[in-house]
Amino acid sequence: MLAIFLKTLPFFALIGLGYWAGRTRFFSEEATAYLTKFVFYFALSAMLFRFAANLSLAEVLNWRLMGAYLMGSCVIYGLATSMAMLRKQDVATAAVEAQCATIGNVGFLGVPMLTLLMGPEAIGPVMLVLAVDLIVFSSLIVILITGSRDGRMNLAILRTVAAGLIRNPMIVAISLGFVWSALALPIPAPVNEFLAILGGAATPGALFAIGASLASKSAERVQVAVWLSFAKLVLHPLFVAIAVLWILPIDPYSASVVIAAAALPVAGNVYMLAQHYGVAPHRVSAAILFSTVASIATVSLVIAWVSQF
């Protein structure tokens, strides 16, 4: 456990450095926004494309893994939605809370950390988890919020969902990478070096941006935020573990990666969606803050546990 904690510590130290920079205003909110945009559109996209282009889609694509992860995630999504409804929350707020309990920071934190801690082979399962989160749950929240406001489903909602997927650079990078791999096209050496250098900025840039963005987060709706953090850090990996180990068992290594990915703290893009639609941004902000701080311990515990597989 101590060895795993010491390995994860540098990642969270980078987050802490970013938090200090944001808290002391050395790094302004505007600077944080631009750094996040650089990582999201350029560095992380270069990393994901390079990873995907060097993978074999036939070897990586695992429908059983995706089904098991989706099954475990749907359980926690339903549980969080039910808890919100019991507190008399509307559909839009329940959807946002369920998103907090289900969507982890796989892109900014999981891709760099899990591939370094669990080996380069982890990138395949991690990208499948990322694909499920981006395609299924990011679409679902838009459908639920927009549909609840309009009172019905219509083609405009589906167009909004489709446009959001097409404009998401992570989805585009992964898709283009797999197309490149399927065509068996070699990456020219100068292009590969360019992608390696640009993608190398993703890990420190993403972690620093996470910390800097946390500096502006508020701790309102504390009880709800604590519940959502517990659901994300403990219940989500627990339900995913049940799914990938017993209900739809997959190979032990892939199972360990998927469970570790499920244990990651609440993703920052949940706050972006909540703010965009004006639905419970403060409780999402607090959930991101609490879950990220608590994950310093919980992620180490989960990775130490799954490493025994």
Image: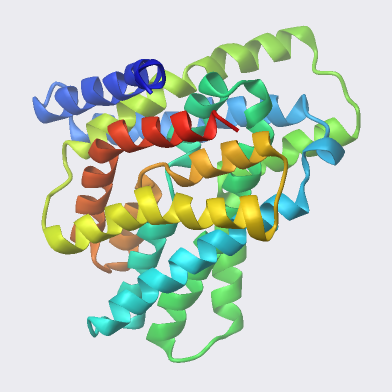
Q: Of 143 and 90, which appears nearest the observer?
A: 90
Q: Of 188 and 258, which appears nearest the observer?
A: 258
Residue 115 vertical position relative to residue 272 in the rendered view, above or below: above
Q: Visible in this render: residue 118?
A: yes
Residue 223 vertical position relative to residue 271 in the rendered view, above or below: below
Image x and y of residue 238, in percent: 46, 53
Q: Going 29% across and 31% down the picture, which residue do you hit?
A: 296
The residue furthest right is 184
Residue 99, quarter of the rendered image: bottom left
Residue 273 vertical position relative to residue 262 in the rendered view, above or below: below
The colour mode here is rainbow
Q: Visible in this render: residue 133?
A: no
Quadrant the C terminus occupies: top right
Image x and y of residue 151, in percent: 43, 91
The residue furthest bottom is 151
Please give left or right for residue 178 compared with residue 114 in the image. right
Quadrant the N terminus occupies: top left
Q: Going 50% across and 25% down the picture, which residue do you hit?
A: 112
Q: Of 44 and 34, which appears nearest the observer?
A: 44
Q: What is the total number of numbered labels drawn onto the structure image?
A: 0
Image x and y of residue 241, in percent: 54, 50
Image x and y of residue 59, in percent: 83, 36
Please give left or right for residue 75 compared with residue 23 in the image. right
Residue 47 vertical position relative to residue 40 in the rendered view, above or below: above
Residue 271, quarter of the rendered image: bottom left
Q: Going 36% across and 81% down the picture, which residue do you hit?
A: 91
Residue 77, quarter of the rendered image: bottom left
